[in-house]
Image (cartoon, rainbow, N blue to C red):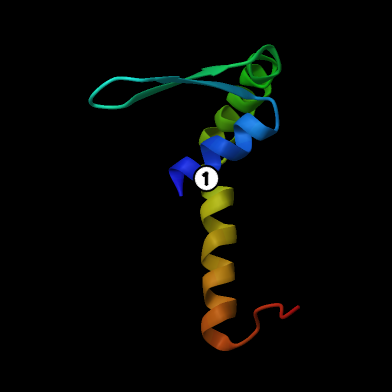
């Protein structure tokens, strides 16, 4: 799953991958300029999540109850 996520981020232009031909194999990933542009908004979103933990926990608990009681949204 990690490799798939890294490859998707590379495909989307957010990461650059460098593969070194050595034993054992070595691969490095770096953020592109566009990847760096996402750091601040993601940090702010993480901060919001930490400051609103009770709210998020309430949503998670409500969803779990809905699944257990059969009220989960079905697409």
24 sits to left or right of 14: left
Q: Position of residue 11 (x, y in %)?
A: 67, 34
Label 1 element class: helix
Q: Nearer the viewer, residue 61 or 22?
A: 22
Name the residue carrying label 1. 4
**Is residue 72 or residue 29 the one in the foreground?**
29
- For this orientation, the residue located farthest to the top is 33
Q: Eyeballing the image, is 50 above or below 29?
A: below
Q: Residue 13: image x %, image y %?
A: 69, 25
Residue drawn at (57%, 40%) of the image: 52
Q: Quadrant of residue 25?
A: top left
Between 42 and 15, the residue placed more toward the observer is 15
Q: Is residue 30 above or below residue 10?
A: above
Q: Quadrant of the C terminus?
A: bottom right
Up/down of 67 relative to 24, above or below: below
Label 1 packing within 10 angstroms: few (<14), some (14-19), many (20+): few
Residue 73 falls left or right of residue 54: right
- Name which residue lies at 51% across and 35% down: 50
Q: Position of residue 23 (x, y in %)?
A: 23, 24
Q: Residue furthest right?
A: 75
Numbered marks: total: 1
In the foreground, 22 or 70: 22
- The structure residue drawn at horizontal position 52% and vertical position 45%, both measured from the top left corner, is 4
Q: Residue at x 70, y 15 (%)?
A: 37
């Amino acid at each position: 799953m990690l490799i798939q996520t890294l490859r998707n981020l590379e495909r989307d232009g957010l990461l650059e991958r460098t593969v070194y031909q050595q034993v054992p194999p070595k691969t490095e990933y770096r953020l592109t300029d566009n990847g760096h542009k996402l750091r601040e908004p993601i940090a702010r979103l993480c901060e919001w999540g930490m400051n609103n933990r009770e709210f998020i926990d309430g949503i998670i608990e409500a969803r779990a109850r809905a699944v257990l009681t059969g009220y989960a949204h079905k697409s």
